[in-house]
Amino acid sequence: MNKKYRRIATLLAVLVAVTSGFMGATIAVGGTSDGAGGLEFENSESGQSYSEISYKVKPGDTLYQVCKDYHVSLGQLMRANNLKNTTIYPDQSLIIPAVNISSYGMVLSRGDVSREDIKLLARLIHAEARGESYLGKVAVGAVILNRMQSPDFPKSIREIILEKNHRVYQFSPVQDGSINLEPDEESVKAAVDALSGQDPTGGALFFYNPVIATDKWIKTLPVITQIGNHVFATRATKV
């Protein structure tokens, strides 16, 4: 199997696992005493898991490409195979670390993440980045993951997405209910790639559309990059 079809097959396997039962999941938005929408998942699904798989190295393969194709980090792959360096040889067998997706969570290079978190992240990406490029969708997901690593934000995807300040949610799709739109396949893929460690923003903690943003404060933050219609920024450096 050549690299192109190997990658397609692998991605499809991951997506099948991630989206198994996905269409049956809904996020109910209901009114709360403070006037803002509250979210809760309603879903019933059985667990799925994929065991470790073995890959035989083909001529021209690199360890970095295998990592990319199978959505595992370089460290994970080297540890699984007791490799001391990144040199690999044709016909060498590599153990690909297990991709485990079950009712207990999904193991990815960004940590243990529940299936519900993946669904919620995909919904946010779809709501925030519809019409943006695929890179722009991954970038939105990366911001959520970057916040998880920051001491200034909650420590779970769900808490970050549902965070609010003075009765206003941090992300407008939660406030207006558009987070309940069914995410397309590209948004699900973008969520998986962001969880796998891809970050085209370079560490951004915020994003906004400068044309429609009304928050004056966010426009004062140091800009890292712009992808499509979104500007990606970080916190101002304390002096």
Image: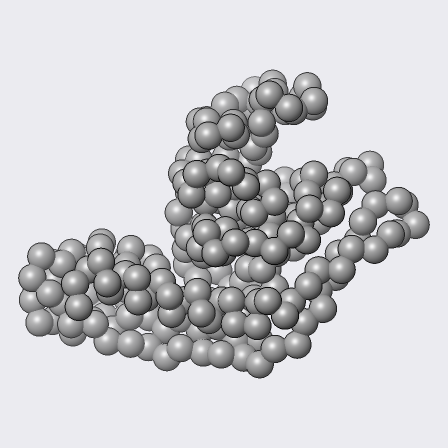
Measuring from the top left, give residue 104's x and y in whole percent. Answer: 57, 74
Q: Quadrant of the N terminus?
A: bottom left
Q: Is residue 207 above or below residue 73?
A: above
Q: Is residue 11 visible?
A: yes
| Left or right of residue 42: residue 123 | left
Q: Is residue 147 visible?
A: no
Residue 93's image quarter?
A: bottom left
Number of marks: 0
Tell me which residue sits at (61%, 77%) in the image: 45
Tell me which residue sits at (82%, 36%) in the image: 166
Tell me which residue sits at (70%, 39%) in the image: 172
| Left or right of residue 149: residue 7 | left
Q: Residue furthest right?
A: 33
Measuring from the top left, give residue 224's x and y in whole percent. Answer: 46, 26
Q: Is residue 30 above or below residue 136?
A: below
Tell me which residue sits at (57%, 67%) in the image: 22
Measuring from the top left, give residue 211's x and y in whole percent. Answer: 60, 21
Q: Quadrant of the C terminus?
A: top right
Measuring from the top left, give residue 114's x and y in whole percent. Answer: 57, 65
Q: How is the image coloured?
A: one colour
| Left or right of residue 76: residue 82 | left
